[in-house]
Every structure is written in structure tokens, then in C-alpha cells.
Image: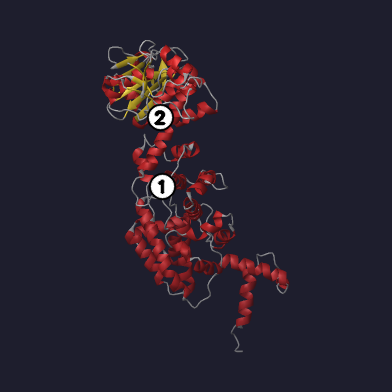
Amino acid sequence: MPTGLVNPLDQLRTRLESSFSSRPYPRDSWSEPEAMTKILAQVRAHHDGPGLDANSRTVDAAVAHFREHGQPDGWRGLKYTCFGAGSPDKHGWCLLSELTLREKLFALAQAEVESRRKIKCFQALLFCYWAFPRATAKQDALVGWTALRGWLASQLPLMESLSSRKPEWFSMLSRHANLLRENPCDRYGPKLFVGDGAEFGEIIKHLGIPSDSWVQEEAVIAQMKIGISLSDNHFKNDLHRWLSLAMGCEGITPSKSLQTRCLAMLVSRYARCSDRPEHMALCDAAVSIIGNPWLYRASWDAHVTDDQGIPNADAREMINAWLKRSLIKYFFELLSADGAGDTRRLDYWLRFEPIIGDMWFALGAEARSKRGESFDKFRERAKGRLLDLRQTTSDNNAFIMRMRIGEFVAIEFGAPGNALYVYQWAALPQEVTQKLMSQSERSDVTIHQLKSKDDAMIRKLHRDSLTALESWEQKFDQELCPLIGYHPEQRPAFMPDIESLLARYSVGGKPIKCEDHRPRGGALWVYVDDSHAVRSLELRGLQFSYRTGRGWYRE
């Protein structure tokens, strides 16, 4: 060996000693298998690991330099710029947002000649891809992120062709290149659906995907896709599971955007079921995350769409109907003197639910102070439509309904002895309409603002007519339906005496048919013969006459 030249083996030995001088493994233990394994693991973790150690200030400085000069500050600057290209600043700007800058960055990363540096740039941009805050990013940043995904996918085959040794995470990425395409996690949906998360967990670990990455959210969506592909019965039987997953009850903390996507999928799928009974857990979840569909229709329609991206009107109206019907029930069962014992007013107004476009609830002192599960649910569902009712008894409440067909408002009260008031919307005091539309939970109205005999188009008490044998429901319909231009398919209730009689004397297990043609100048008909002596006696006592071959009638 020539004098003055350093033996290459000695040089390597010196560098190794220097590299591991701070490690807790002495040189004389290198020959031991266990110690060697630990050292090798350290080397691989440091050099082959999927993640990158980067100081946020260093990254920010590198991105700022690239933004200002259009060039990185040396090799380290390029690496850290790749790492931070998707991180938004306080204004929501990130390097991926700008077409010129991102294309220049991609070109510089691609132009690196040395294989190790080329892989490091790819690795940094890959981490940028995983860590991108997709749920909160602005649209121009989302466009840039999609471009990054395309660049990574196009570079992967070229990176595989490099002759240099690849890190271990690269082999994992090559086997799961679907992560660089649309619907990246659909592949894992079937296993995750049955509770097998082993493969997906290995991917997260070996690719260094952050715990708060959008990848985990896409895995939830992949499971949702499996769920909504089931038959109607299987989907509805497992709906509680999908709701738990969407609402963060399955060990994950979903973002608001993920919850919105999941609930939009579930609501749209439920709306396609041939039989779709009320499902208030689904309704409450959708309203709490997406919003009240009659208050925030534009936002609702932007999220809840069909397969063609068109607002799903069926889903919107389904939730609308459930929500309105539940609020009507709450008023007459919780907030009125009727309670659950007398359902006549409840049954009457449920018939008009399809045309009630909006509703408000003005609460008296008692209702404002009441607590409990039912009252809490009512307040949550009625959020944005609650007011205080002043200058009345503490037990009184008001239910204000705005009819969608025509500009009319019907107002019912909770305390006994109060009449129904129907106004034209424009006839209400301007102060009242402003408060109704304000969505403020602190607005108040007085009982006198809601009761005006002079301005009311209809003012009627809930009293049956014994002489005319008419229920108050029939009398209300005779005035209200022509005024608002809507006639419910279900007939109004008859007098309680007639109702109970028809229920007692059903024929062959079927209710006796009854029609009231008096509003059109005809008679009230009960279509049953006179073969039952007691029934016939009761009908005659109610001043009915019998016509052979047709039935009993009263004009």
C-alpha cells in the first residue's frame, strides 16, 4: 500500500465508529446477533423509514424562499419545500395552490440525477400528499393536491426502475399503488367491513401515514360504500352501525366534512328504500351535521346529492317530513294542555304537514325552564325556530305554522280556551315577521301580537257542533282548506260519537265507510244496512234516516 494513503477499510471503520459513538451499543458487542439486530433496526428507521424529521420553521423558511425566488435554497431547501408544499399558511395559501410553482417543484424533483436524492424528493412529496388537510383546504389547493396525486402516480414506475436500493416503504407503496388513484381505499373496504383491519394497519404503519390523514377518512367511506350497497333490509338492520361510525362512536374522531359525507350517503340510501318508516336517529344526526333542510336548503342540496350529483329532493323531503312531524307531535304532546291523552289537534295538523313550509315555537315561562330528554330533543330539533312568549300565563305556548301553498299563517296555542288564528303572512306585525325570520334564540313575541281579531281571516274555537253533528275538525276544514288551496287526502275526524259508533260496529273486521257531502250540499252518509238492531237504534238517536240499498244519512 502506498505510503501516505489511508486504507479504505480503516476509513470505513473510522466513519462507522463516529456514526455510532453516541449509541448505547459498544463496538465490541457488534458481533452479537441481538445487538446487531438493534443497530440494523436503528439504521433502517433512520434511513429507510417512511416519515421525515423536519422542523416546522425550517420547512416554512424553505417554502417561503421558493415562493419568493422560484428556486429552492440548495438541496436541503428543495427537500423541505417538497415536504411543506401542501401545508397552508394562516390565509389558507399553500405552494400546491399555484400552478406555476407546483409544476416547477415537480420538475426539479424529477430532474434530480442522484437516485438517493430523487427518492428523498419523492418521499417528501408523498408525505405532503398524506398530510394534506383535504377537509379544510381551499379549492385551488385541492386542485393542486389532485395534481400532486397524478404526479406521484406517474413517477412511481420510474422510481421502481431505478437501479439503486429502494427503502422498505417503497415496496409497500408499489403493492398499494391504488392509494395514488381515485377511491384510494375501496380495496380495503370489504375487510374493514367485517372487522379485519390488519392489512390497513400495516399500510398506515409502513407508509408513515399520519394518524389524522385523509386516508383514514377514506377508509371509513370505503366501509360506507359497502353498507349502502346492501339490500334494503340488511341496510336498515345495520343502520345503527353506520350511524355510530359516522358520528365517531367506533374509535375514530371524524372531521365535520367526513361526517357530512357519511350522513349524506346514508340519507340518500335510506330515501331509496321501498319502505322507509321514520328513523329519528338518522334524522337527528343529519340535522345536527348537515343542517335543517328547510332552513339551510342550499347547503343541504350541495351535500346530499344523487349518483349524478343532482340535489336529492327525495332525501331532503323525507328528512323535512320527519322533522316537521316530530315537532308537531312535541308541541301537542309536551307543550299543550291536550298532552298525550287527547290527540285530536295533533291528528288534525299532521294532515297538513306536506304544506307546512316553516314553523316556530314561542315558549312560555314553564316550557323555557323545563328539562329532560324529551324537552332537550325538542329544543335541538327546533333550533333556530324558538322564541319566548311574553304577556301570557306561564303554561301557554304558541305554535306558528307558515303554509307553503299561499301566504298564510296558522297559530295554535297550548293553554286551554285559546282559538285557532289564521292570518295572511303580510298581516302579521312587521316586528313579528322580522323576529320569526331572524333565527335568533333570544327573540320574543307577545300573546297580543299573535292574537288580533280584526286581522285574522279565521278565528275558531275547538268546539264540536252538537246540533249540526259536526266536529270542530270538519268545521275548520270547511274554512281553512278553500282559503289555503289544499285539501288533505285523509278526511277530518267526525264527531266523537260517530267515530266511536263506527269503531264499535265494524263489519267483518273492516271499519264502516262514512262520507260527508254536506259541504257540497249533500248529506252525511254511513254506508251500512239496518240489520243490526242496536246499531240502528243509535243511528236513529243521532237523527239519521235509513235508505234501503244505500245506508244511513243525515242532511
**Displayed quadrant of residue 454:** top left
Q: Quadrant of the N terminus?
A: bottom right
**Displayed quadrant of residue 488:** top left
| Amino acid type, mark 1 | Lys
Which of the two marks, 2 or 1, is nearer to us in this view?
2
Image location of residue 144, percent across then percent down:
37, 58
In the image, 325 versus 75, the foreground residue is: 325
Would you say residue 385 is visible in this rendering?
Answer: no
Toward the bottom, the furthest residue is 1
| SS for callout 1 | loop
- The residue at which mark 2 appears reads as 384
In the image, 354 versus 197, the foreground residue is: 354
How many other residues sit within 10 Å of disc 2, few (<14), some (14-19) or many (≥20)? some
In the image, 242 versus 71, the foreground residue is: 242
| SS for callout 2 | loop
Image location of residue 188, percent across then percent down:
52, 59
Q: Label 2, label 1: how many angstroms apart (C-alpha)?
A: 32 Å
Which of pointers 2 and 1 lies earlier in the amino acid sequence?
A: 1
How many other residues sit within 10 Å of disc 1, few (<14), some (14-19) or many (≥20)? few
Q: In the rendered view, would you say 97 is above or below 242?
A: below
Image location of residue 138, percent across then percent down:
37, 50
Would you say residue 322 is visible in this rendering?
Answer: yes
**Displayed quadrant of residue 31:** bottom right
- The residue at which mark 1 appears reads as 90
The label shown at residue 156 is none
| Amino acid type, mark 2 | Gly
Taking the spot 32% from the left edge, 24% from the top edge, the residue there is 434
Q: In the rendered view, would you say 505 is above or below 176?
A: above
Taking the spot 48% from the left edge, 67% from the top edge, the residue there is 120
Image location of residue 428, percent across then percent down:
29, 19
